[in-house]
Amino acid sequence: MPPKKGKKKTKAELEAERIAAEEEAERLRQAEQKRLEEERVAREERRKKWQEEQVNYRMDELTRLKEELFAGKHALQESKEKLAVKQEAKTRDLEWQRYLECDPSPDASSESDLNTYVSLSRETQAASLQEALERCSATEDIVQSVRRVWAEAQARGDSSLASRQGGFCERLRESSSEQLNSAALHVLRHADEYLEDDQVLLAEEKAGVAVGLWVNLIIKSFRGPVKPIMFKNIGLQVDIPKALNQQRIAVRAMFLPYDPVTNAVSDSEDLVLGGVMQVDLLAQSPPAKKLRPKWVLRPSRTPTVELERVPFGEDSPNSASAQQPLRCTFRIPDSVYFVPSESPRIVTWDAKISQWTSDGVNSQVVEYNEETRALRFLAVRTGLFALVQSRIAHLPFTSWKLEPALRVRPEDEDEEDEGGCVHYTVVAQSVEIKIQVRESGCELIAPAIPGLQFREMGTGELLFALRDAGINLMPTDADVARIPPFEDLLPVAAPPEAPPAAADGEEAGEEAGETKMEQKEEEEKKDAAAEGGAAEENGTADGEGSAPVEAPAQAAAEPLGPVRTPLEPKVKEMERKLSSDVARLASSFDFEGSTWNHLVGSQRSVMKVRETSVYTGGNEETFDFKLVLAEMDAISESARKAPGIGDLSGAAVKYSFLNMKDDGAASADPAEHEEDFGDPTEAICPGFSDKREQGTLTHVFLNFLVKEQCSEEANERVESSSEELAQAVERLLLLTRPFSFS
C-alpha cells in the first residue's frame, strides 16, 4: 500500500516558521557583524601596536647604526693615516734608489714627467733597428708603470685620472711607433749598405718586439705564384704575390707584444691576444749616387720626411679582386694561455672607423699550428692584424672565494716562508684563476702561465697581464649588455588544477556547492589561526625579544622551473663598501660567493662568511658558512615598515645574517612567523627570504657583524693585520668586481 501523505501545514504554521527563520537569520547576521567588528577592533589594535613596534625599532636601529658609523669611520681614518705614512716612506725610498741608480725614466704618476718624456723622445729619432728596439723596450717599461697607476685610479673610482693615464699609454706607444718608422726610413735610405747575397733582409727582436725588413733592390724572377719572405728567428713571414716582386718596394713585418690602438680605458668588444702583427708595403727611397770615392749623394734626412706606404688590396685604387692576397704568419707568444685553435678569429684595424674589423682578412683560410704556435692567414690589405676573442669569453664568474692561507712557493724554491697571505680564487667560464695576495704584491698560482706564475707584480699589473694572456678579469659596465642572462632553477607556482567536468548540470551544481563549502571551511580555519596568533603578545619588532607564532610547515616543496635572470651590477656605493669591508677581514675570515647574489637585484648582495680554520685546523671545515645580506638601507625591511622615520646618511649599506642557507633551506633556528601589517611587497626572488637570523642585529660595518659570533683570536688577527695587505685585497676586489659579475 502507498504511504500515507503527511498532514498539510496550515498557513499559520508556515508563517510562524518563516518568521522564526527570519529571526534566526537576523540573530546570526547580528552575531556575525558583532564578531567581525570585534575582529576589526582587535586587528586595528594589533596594527597600531605593530606600527609602534616598527617605529621604535627603526628609531633604535638608526641610533645604534649611527653610533657604529662614527666609531667605524674613526677606525678607518686611523688605518688610512697609517697607510699614508708607510706609502710616503716607501715613495721616498724608491726615489732615493732611482737617484742612486741614475734612472732617467719618468715618474709614472707625474703628468709633467710623462709629457716631457714624450716630447724628448720625438725630438731624437732612432737611426737603426737596434736603437729603435732599445727605445721601444724602455718606453714599454714606462707604459707598464702607467698601467699600474691606471689600475690604482680605477680601483679608487677616479675615472678622470684613469682616462688620462690611458691617453698617456697611447701617446707613449705612438712615440715607439715613430722610432720604428724612423729606423725603417734609415734602412731604406741606406739599403745599399745592407745588401748581402743580392738582397736586403734584416730581422731584429728585443723584449718581444720583432721587426723584419726586406728591400727589393735587385729584382729577380722566381718560379711559383708567391715569393716567401722569411724573417728567421723572429717568427714572422710574409709571402707576396709574384706581381709585387717585380716592383721596387720594401716589405716590413713587425710584431708588437701589445695593442697599440685600443688603450686601457677602451670598451671594445674584442680583446687582442698577445699582440699585433703589422705588415707594410713601403716605397723605396731614391737610390744613392756615388759621385767620387767616399762621396755618396742620398736624400736628406729631415723630421718631415715620413715612410711612404704602397697601397695594396682594398687600399689600392686598382681592383682588389684581381690582386692576389698576402700570406702572413706570426707566432703567438707563450704568455697567451687561451688560443682559440678551433676557430681563430683574425681582424684588422680600420683607422677610419677606429675599430677592429674582419674586412680585408680571409676568415676561411686561417691556420694554427699548436706545436709551433704559428698562425697563418690571408690578407687583402696591409696594416695591423691581431688574434682576438670576446671580452666576455670568461664572464660572468661561476664562483669566487677569498681565504687566508700560508704562502705557496714554486717547487724549485727552497726558502721557507711561513708568512701569512690571502688566496683569491675565481672560477670563470672554462678556467679557474688563483691569485696569492701579499703585502708586497700579487702572485699568480694557477693556471701555470709561462712568465706569470709566481712572478710578483702589482694588482693592476697582474690583471693586465692576465688580460693580455686571454683571461679578462676586469669587467666593465659596458660588458653587462653583452653577457647572456643566468639560467637558474627556482621555485615556481604550480598552475591551479581545473575541477573535473560534471556529468550533468545537477552534478556540477553539487560539486560547486561542495567547493564553496570547502573554501568556507578553509577560511574559518585561517580566521581561527589568526585569532590564536593574535592572542599571543608580540615583543619588539623584527623578532628581537619577541615570542612570535611558528609558521605552519609547508605540505610539500614547490616545484622547480627554469628562470632566466639578466645580469644586474650592484650600485657603486655598495660595491665599494663591500670591497672595503671584506678586505679588512680577509686575514681572518673565509668568504665565498652565493648562488643568490645575482638574483637579489642591484641594491642587495649575498655572500657566505665563516671564521677561518687555517691557523688552527689545517683549513679543515671546522666552521659552517653563514649567509650575509648586504643591502641599501632605503630598501631594507625596517625602512619599509617604518617609512619617514629617518635614513642612514653617510653609509647607506648595512649587513645582517640571514635565517637561511645557500641551498634555500632554513638555518638551525627555524624562521619565525610574525603578523605583518605593512604594504604588500613583491618577493625579492622565488625561494629567497631576507629574514634576519633570530637574536642578531643589523650593522653598518661587516667587522661589527661577525665580531659577535667569532673567537677573540679572530678579532685579534683582524686588528693586527697590515694595512698594505687590506689595500691590495681591496684593489683586487674593486678591479675584478665579483659582487656584480657572479
Image (tube, rainbow, N blue to C red):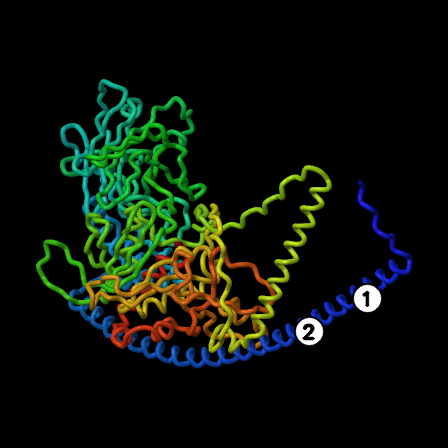
Report if residue 250 is visible in the image.
Answer: no
Q: Nearer the viewer, residue 373 or 61?
A: 61
Q: Residue furthest top?
A: 223
Percent x, y of residue 601: 48, 58
- In the figure, is residue 537 to the left or right of 574? right
Q: Nearer the viewer, residue 20 or 734?
A: 20
**Residue indicated by mark 1:** 23
Percent x, y of residue 130: 18, 46
Dot 2 lies on which element?
helix
What residue lies at 66% left-to-right and 54% top-to-bottom? Answer: 517
Report if residue 86 is visible in the image.
Answer: yes
**Residue indicated by mark 2:** 38
Q: Nearer the viewer, residue 443 or 297?
A: 443
- In the figure, is residue 715 to the left or right of 476? left
- Alpha carbon distance from label 2 to label 1: 22 Å
Q: Quick check: 143 above or below 188?
A: below
| Category of crowding for the residue at label 1, using alpha-carbon neighbours closer than 10 angstroms: few (below 14), some (14–19), many (at least 20) | few
Percent x, y of residue 677: 60, 69
Q: Quick check: 720 above or below 386?
A: below
- In the figure, is residue 292 to the left or right of 716? left
Residue 614, by quadrant, is: bottom left
